[in-house]
């Protein structure tokens, strides 16, 4: 589970980007921390990079398909 020490650097958001699920090998449209919905594995990825493909991230078949969900959005300063 993602952790933080200083709450002042994070704020809760209600954006729809947190509800979407992405297939392995999809483009990460937002920089941040993504979590595998089935097994809980987390990765950090830059915007525009590719989420791990099916053959990179493996877990037991009984857990269901690999799907990535954004859990922490690293918002660029404008």
Image (spheres, grey):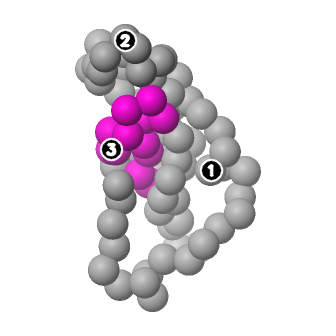
Q: Give the x, y percent position of residue 78.
A: 58, 73
Observer-nearest residue: 34 or 2?
2
Q: Badges 3 and 1: C-beta atoms under 8 Å apart? A: no
Secondary structure at numbered mark 1 = helix
Q: What element carries label 3?
A: strand
Crowd rating for badge 2 (residues with CA inside 10 Å; few <14, some 14–19, many 20+) = few
The verdict on residue 57 being magenta is: no
The image quarter in which residue 38 lies: top left
Point out the residue furthest to the front here.
Answer: 62
Q: Determine if residue 13 is in view.
A: yes
Disc marking residue 43: 3
Question: Picture coordinates of residue 64 (x, y %)?
Answer: 47, 18
Q: Can residue 24 be seen in this view?
A: no
Q: Mark 1 points at which residue?
A: 18
> What x and y, as percent, mark residue 42?
34, 44
Camera-side mark, 3 or 2: 2
């Amino acid at each position: 589970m993602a952790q933080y020490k200083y709450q002042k650097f994070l704020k809760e958001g209600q954006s729809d980007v947190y509800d979407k699920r992405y297939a392995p090998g999809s483009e990460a449209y937002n920089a941040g921390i993504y979590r595998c919905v089935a097994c809980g594995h987390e990765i950090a990825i830059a915007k525009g990079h590719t989420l791990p493909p099916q053959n990179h991230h493996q877990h037991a078949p009984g857990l269901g398909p690999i799907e990535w969900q954004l859990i922490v959005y690293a918002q660029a300063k404008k």
